[in-house]
Image (cartoon, rainbow, N blue to C red):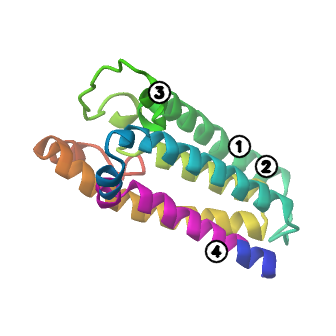
């Protein structure tokens, strides 16, 4: 690995840590106390920060010269599409479903209705509890198969570790928020991989 790969590795780790840090309930409570009424914009600022830093990180990743791990063959190209296409479809379904709630855009509405959060158990959530993470992992590993570069391997490994840790943190939050309802749901539906 060269210097650019080390920078990329550190950047992906830093992105993952910051993403989890600002999503933590204690951090949000702290910001809530400081910001007061303006805290309603926290989610929007968080989403903008995450999107901008992700774009910058991906720009850097795809701009560096990276070493090919192995020669790409037509079979691997076809295999990669078996990961990439479902990954993109799953991510798009989830983003479309959650965009309004997760982006924080509702903070811009003056007379926004108060929405009681409900535990999602239908659609993709009937197959896995964390479909967005599942789709993301399919996509990044498919990208590695299609473009077997060290830079893509770094991204795939760091994002996989981030997802595994992030799921554990999210599961604790969901259990606190939904209690027995989430416990029963988790007994019926696998965490990340369908059928496991």
User: Residue 147, can we see it?
Assistant: no
| Left or right of residue 168, residue 56 in this image | right
Q: Is residue 97 above or below residue 142?
A: above
Taking the spot 64% from the left edge, 54% from the top edge, the residue there is 53
Residue occupying image coordinates x 80% and y 75%: 4
* Mark with earlier residue (2, 3): 2
Instruction: Relative to 83, say whether 120 is above or below.
Output: above
Q: Is residue 15 above or below residue 92?
A: below
Q: Which quadrant of the view contains residue 165?
A: bottom left
Residue nearer the viewer, 181 or 101? 101
Given this view, does label 4 or label 2 mark the residue nearer the observer? Answer: 4
Of the numbered discs 3 and 4, the one sitting upstream in the chain is 4
Residue 6 place in picture, x, y as percent: 72, 78
Q: Nearer the viewer, mark 2 or mark 3?
A: 3
Neighbor class of circle 4 (other Cα within 10 Å; few <14, some 14-19, many 20+) is some
Q: CA distance from mark 1 to mark 4?
A: 28 Å
Q: Quadrant of residue 8?
A: bottom right
* Mark with earlier residue (3, 1): 1
Region in magenta: 8-29
* Between discs 1 and 4, the one toward the N terminus: 4
Q: Residue sitting at 62 percent across and 66 percent down?
A: 12
| Mark 3 and mark 1: Cα distance apart in space | 38 Å
Checking the image for residue 10, the label placed there is 4
The answer to whether residue 195 is seen in the rendering is yes
Q: Is residue 23 magenta?
A: yes
Q: Main secondary structure of the magenta part?
A: helix
Q: In the rendered structure, which disc, 4 or 2, sits on the residue that comes first in sequence?
A: 4
């Amino acid at each position: 690995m060269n210097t650019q790969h080390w920078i990329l590795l550190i950047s992906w780790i830093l992105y993952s840590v910051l993403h989890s840090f600002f999503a933590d309930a204690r951090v949000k409570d702290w910001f809530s106390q400081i910001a007061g009424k303006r805290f309603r914009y926290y989610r929007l600022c968080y989403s903008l920060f995450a999107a901008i830093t992700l774009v910058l990180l991906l720009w850097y990743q795809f701009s560096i010269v990276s070493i090919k791990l192995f020669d790409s063959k037509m079979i691997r190209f076809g295999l990669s599409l078996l990961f990439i296409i479902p990954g993109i479809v799953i991510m798009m379904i989830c983003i479309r479903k959650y965009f309004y709630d997760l982006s924080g855009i509702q903070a811009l509405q003056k007379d926004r209705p108060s929405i009681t959060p409900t535990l999602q158990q239908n659609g993709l959530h009937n197959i896995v509890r964390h479909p967005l993470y599942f789709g993301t992992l399919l996509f990044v590993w498919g990208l590695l198969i299609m473009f077997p570069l060290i830079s893509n391997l770094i991204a795939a490994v760091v994002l996989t570790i981030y997802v595994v840790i992030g799921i554990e943190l999210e599961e604790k939050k969901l259990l606190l928020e939904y209690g027995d309802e989430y416990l029963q749901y988790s007994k019926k539906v696998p965490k990340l991989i369908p059928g496991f």
